Image (tube, rainbow, N blue to C red):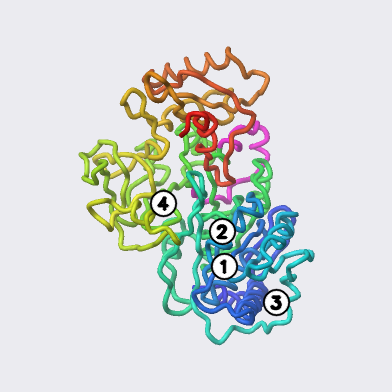
Amino acid sequence: MHPSIWAARRPDHAATVMAETGQTMRYDELERQSNRGAQLFRSMGLATGDTVAIWCDNRPEFLMVSWAAERAGLSFAPISTKLTAAEAEFIVRDSDARAVVASTAIGAEVAALAANMRDGPPILVLGSPIAGAEVWDDAAGRMPDTPIADEAPGKPMLYSSGTTGKPKGIRHASRTGTIQDDHPYEAWLSTSYGVDKDSVFFSPAPLYHAAPLLFSLTCQRIGATVVLMSRFDPEATLAAIARCRITHAQMVPTMFVRMLRLPVETRAKYDLSSLRTIVHAGSPCAPDTKRGMIEWLGPILDEYYSGSEGFGRTCITSQEWLDHPGSVGRATHGILHICDDDGDEVATGEIGAVYIESDVTFDYHKDSQKTADAANPRHPTWRTYGDIGYVDEGGYLYLTDRRAFMIISGGVNIYPQEAENILLGHPAVADVAVIGVPDAEMGEAVKAVVQPIDASRAGPELAAELIEWCRGRLSHYKCPKTVDFDGELPRAATGKLHKKEVRDRYWASNGA
């Protein structure tokens, strides 16, 4: 399916709605505006296979520009609105973008990008004019609202988050056929989660991230309404679900933590009965958090494990999770393999690197070594997202941590996620990062960096309490030896913890 089909069948149906304001873009308007955008890209000399960068806040125009690029056969590279002009410039240049569409809502950084890239591709702005750029509405408004003559299916070019280094673009093989051919995600969302043309999908996370963008675009392929939120807020989320009669939502665990910490009377104010499914992924979900959400909303939480590279996926329903707590499910796309450092499979239940065997191919743009490093050394069609875990006898996958953040203390492997899950259950903890820090005797020692709910409690007494809390629930060698406090830990809007940034504070003076 494709939005153009729904523009013909249900032109006045809402394609995109802003939760806070009710601003709506109907399917007929999405069709007209995306056609004008595709015509504009062609008039600028962009051909099938070229790339356009999109630097935009959550607004209906983000999806409209994505569809304009998609129907012109372009790759479209979303850029985080949290980045500086210099960081955005890196992605623009690295992706070989031949045009940039940016939102003036991002502020002075867009003007700085235009000033920095006078030798770069043209910049079109959504919103008020800025020096060195043309206003999108003015440029697109001069174009016909009919389809271009050479429509071809495009695709996103997603960039990794850069939590362990410079972000890398992920390129997949070009799609063939027509823009209205079935897309693999359509079957997944419709079969697994029941998304149909009458669904109302809620995306409170930024569209520049993989899951929010891909879910939103796929829902519009199916003809559903997509409700966007400018910025996540726990109570405003409940209000939006009740007001818009949301049926499906895609969230991340940090949103669950903040929603669960709302007073019971606040949660009870809102009618959430329209909800059929909340899909979550993106970062580990502490078992206590997930159990709390299921107890509150019922068994409507569906989790999946995958990555922007898209070569494999596991899924698990609420009931399956209650029977296999802590699991991220069984493989629904690809075949799971748990391997040692040499690339050989380990026995069931043993911990190792998680690989998924798949026929989906991808490349890290301009980084053949990183592409090669993702493959199993013995089996090139087995690739890894960089996680460590194990599989039980039923084929359920359990993730223990990211390979890059494993702590080796006295020759023993320690997986920080275990202690993080325990500490997040303490009533005084708002957020936590468990890391390895330099230790002369053991090589690394386990440290917890805690963001307390009440900053006034930060100090030796709470630190000792948290260490004992952890030791009462986990083997002592896995628990932090020391605790530091931080006013706010660095997390992406998707909930992904920038642990490298935290870890670097302790290793920078050590030469690591």
User: In terms of depth relative to the viewer, which is nearer, 390 or 367?
Assistant: 367
Q: Position of residue 73 (x, y in %)?
A: 51, 75
Which residue is denoted by mark 3 in the rendering?
Answer: 140
From mark 3 to mark 2, how far is it between C-alphas? 24 Å
Task: Classify mark 2: helix, strand or loop.
Answer: helix
From mark 4 to mark 3, how far is it between C-alphas? 36 Å
Residue type (three-letter) at the residue carrying disc 1: Ala
Dot in front, 3 or 2: 2
Within 10 Å of the Cα at label 1, are there few (<14), some (14-19), or many (20+) other Cα atoms? many
Q: Which mark is residue 91?
A: 2
Left/right of residue 395 with respect to residue 269 in the rendered view: left
From mark 4 to mark 2, how far is it between C-alphas? 23 Å
Q: Earlier in the sequence, mark 4 or mark 3?
A: 3
Residue type (three-letter) at the residue carrying disc 2: Ile
Within 10 Å of the Cα at label 3, are there few (<14), some (14-19), or many (20+) other Cα atoms? many
**Relative to 188, residue 288 above or below:** above
Q: Earlier in the sequence, mark 1 or mark 4?
A: 1
Residue type (three-letter) at the residue carrying disc 3: Ala
Residue type (three-letter) at the residue carrying disc 4: Ser
Q: Earlier in the sequence, mark 4 or mark 2?
A: 2
Which residue is denoted by mark 4 in the rendering?
Answer: 306
Which residue is denoted by mark 1 in the rendering?
Answer: 97
Q: Position of residue 37 (x, y in %)?
A: 64, 75
**Relative to 174, residue 394 above or below:** above
Q: Position of residue 405 (x, y in %)?
A: 42, 36
Query: Residue at 34% across / 57% down in the picture?
Result: 333
Task: Classify mark 4: helix, strand or loop.
Answer: loop
The reply to whether the C-beta atoms of the residues labelled 3 and 1 are less than 8 Å apart is no
Q: Earlier in the sequence, mark 3 or mark 2?
A: 2
